[in-house]
């Protein structure tokens, strides 16, 4: 979750100077990113700053903090508000059905690796054509 965001933030300038990213995160230590950090509490999914306009992101990459349909449902509200269409969700394999139901996401054949052994199998889900799917 946050580590993935840090890695993206470190590499984004290598990809293109026109790439911008915003990190929505509960952990205020990430405020070190300045204007690119937005405090986010999934319990208030649409409590966002005025500057985060509806459908203002080409892609939303999300990693909800809990493996529950209640949490995913609230995060889905934020995702649907922010995205122009593309969604990449990283969460447990047990969330396949709710991810499909809530956001029409399909599980990817790509298997993400994690530095620490996670108790639950971790998977990615997308709603667009991607080489991660096949």
Image: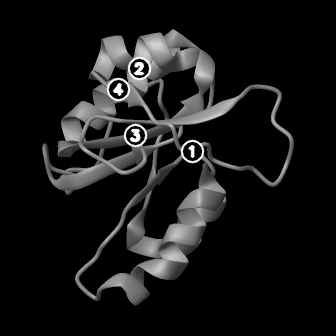
State the CA–CA distance, disc 3 to disc 1. 30 Å
State the CA–CA distance, disc 2 to disc 4. 9 Å
Please state the horizontal and vertical placement of residue 30, each as a whole percent of the image.
59, 63
Q: Which residue is mark 1?
A: 26
Please state the horizontal and vertical placement of residue 97, each as a whole percent of the image.
45, 11
Please state the horizontal and vertical placement of residue 112, each as a whole percent of the image.
63, 47
Q: Nearer the viewer, mark 1 or mark 2?
A: 2
Of callouts 3 and 4, which one flags the residue occurring earlier in the amino acid sequence? 4
Q: Nearer the viewer, mark 2 or mark 4?
A: 2
Of callouts 3 and 2, which one flags the residue occurring earlier in the amino acid sequence? 2
State the CA–CA distance, disc 3 to disc 4. 20 Å
**Circle number at residue 133:** 3
Residue in front for this viewpoint, 37 or 68: 68
**Protein image colouring:** one colour
Secondary structure found at label 2:
helix
Of callouts 3 and 1, which one flags the residue occurring earlier in the amino acid sequence? 1
Picture layout, residue 35 above or below residue 70: below
Q: Which residue is mark 2?
A: 99
User: Do labels 3 and 2 touch, CB within 8 Å?
Assistant: no
Can residue 111 be seen in the rendering of this structure?
yes
Q: Residues within 10 Å of mark 1 (few under 14, many from 20)?
A: some
Q: Which residue is mark 4?
A: 76
Please state the horizontal and vertical placement of residue 122, each as a whole percent of the image.
65, 34
Q: Residue at x 57, y 32 (%)?
A: 91
User: Do labels 1 and 2 touch, CB within 8 Å?
Assistant: no
Q: Residues within 10 Å of mark 4 (few under 14, many from 20)?
A: many
Q: Residues within 10 Å of mark 3 (few under 14, many from 20)?
A: some
Secondary structure found at label 4:
helix
Of callouts 4 and 1, which one flags the residue occurring earlier in the amino acid sequence? 1
State the CA–CA distance, disc 3 to disc 2. 15 Å
């Amino acid at each position: 979750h946050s580590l993935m965001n840090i890695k993206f933030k470190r590499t984004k300038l290598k990809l293109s100077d026109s790439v911008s990213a915003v990190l929505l995160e509960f952990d205020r230590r990430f405020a070190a990113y300045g204007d690119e950090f937005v405090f986010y509490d999934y319990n208030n999914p649409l409590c966002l700053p005025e500057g985060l306009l509806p459908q203002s992101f080409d892609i939303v990459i999300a990693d909800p903090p809990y493996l529950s349909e209640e949490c995913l449902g609230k995060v889905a509200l934020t995702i649907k508000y922010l995205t122009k269409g593309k969604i990449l969700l990283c969460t447990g394999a047990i969330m396949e059905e709710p991810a499909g139901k809530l956001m029409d996401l399909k599980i990817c054949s790509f298997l993400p690796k994690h530095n620490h052994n996670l108790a639950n199998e971790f998977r990615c889900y997308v709603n667009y054509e991607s080489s991660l799917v096949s």
